[in-house]
Image (cartoon, rainbow, N blue to C red):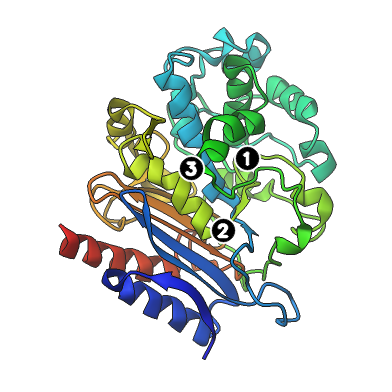
Amino acid sequence: MAEVHGYCDERFRPIEEAFQGFLDSKVDKGASLAVTLRGEPVVDLWGGTRDYEERQPWEADTVVRVFSTSKVILMITVLLLVDRGLLDLDAPIVDHWPDFGRHGKDTMTARQVLLHQSGLPGFGCTMSMDELDDWDHVMKVLEDAALWYEPGTISCYHPQTYGFILGELTRRVGDLPFDEYVRRELTEPLGADFHLRFRDDPTRVAALWPAVSDAAFESPMAAAAFGELLADGEWIDPEYLSSLNPAGSGITNARGLARVGSVVACGGELDGRRYLSRKIVAEAGREQSFERDEMFGPLRLGLGFGLDSEDYPASTPTSMHWGGYGGSFLTMDPTSGISCGFAPNQLMIGEALGDDPRLATYWRLLGEISKELA
């Protein structure tokens, strides 16, 4: 039996049992899972190993790359900007970034980016890690990029452009680089162990076990956008750890995810500090789009967050969520006050993105526990 560390409130004991089961069955090599209830930690678990030799135990402070779960932090940052009157989601992006308007992009809005309907799901080219780590170069590529479709007419998940477009908007209206704005306004005040650029002790970072198979897409557009994601080394290489991609470079653990998610789960206020207004949290959880996405199929969205639907059932009908490549996730429910984060080092891809037995199990259990707590 795998050794599981941490603690679990008795009311959430089924989640600990599931966590133990996934480690015992080797579905997970190593992982962390955390839950907060109205801002208070009620589950904080970790176990398994963090290295390819499976000798080094997953520690309390072990962190791992969570890929697109990073987008939740990006979504919350955009909400901060909107709440403070710095960003109008329906104004053209060129109002703040004039050079972005080339090749028909002059009408694109931040809302269209949030909803993956901007017309620019990919760069139109692949870039090396060195190129992606050059912010100015990426911005030049985006400025010169041609639309893939007319903004607002098609939903196609934006793996990378999502973060760079919204990250540059944050830099321009927030007057700070994106990662610095996030640190000052969100992760540092929260005390969350979340890093968009990891410059701490690299031995804290867990190695990633690749998925056995990758998702296949019937849509040529989705395949092209997803195909731009290249990696020519290990995700734990130093150059990758320090590279910034607002939509996918987050390195953290479940505790850090759940802590950030508590802001939304608690209606915008946590520990006596108001990060977001209740109004913007409610708007973020209101259906903004329900379209057949080229990559995911039927996709119901709030202001970027995934919402409960038949095809992608959430942990509760009022939860907001998003996940990352291979299985990490963060789900937040302002009704129950529950925030739950999961960060594994065993990547898993089913027949489709989002098809993961761990997610299905944890969300089912969260739903059942939420009903008991109501």
- Rendered image: mark on residue 160: 1
Give residue 253's mark: 2
Q: Is residue 252 above or below residue 286?
A: below
Q: Amino acid at mark 3?
A: Val
Q: Position of residue 47 (x, y in %)?
A: 55, 76
Residue in the foreground of this view, choosing between 259 and 371 = 259
Q: Is residue 359 visible?
A: yes
Q: Say which amino acid is labelled 1.
A: Gln
Q: Quadrant of residue 242?
A: top right
Labelled pair 3, 1 in contact (Cβ < 8 Å)? no
Give the crowd class for mark 1: few <14, some 14-19, many >=20 residues within 10 Å.
many
Residue at 68 percent across and 12 percent down: it is: 99
The residue identified by callout 3 is 72
Counting from the top left corner in percent of width and height, residue 290 is at 32, 39
245 vs 138, nearest the viewer: 245
Extreme-front residue of the structure: 272
User: Which image quadrant is residue 138 in?
Assistant: top right
Element at badge 3? helix
- Looking at the image, residue 162 sits to the left or right of residue 54; the answer is left
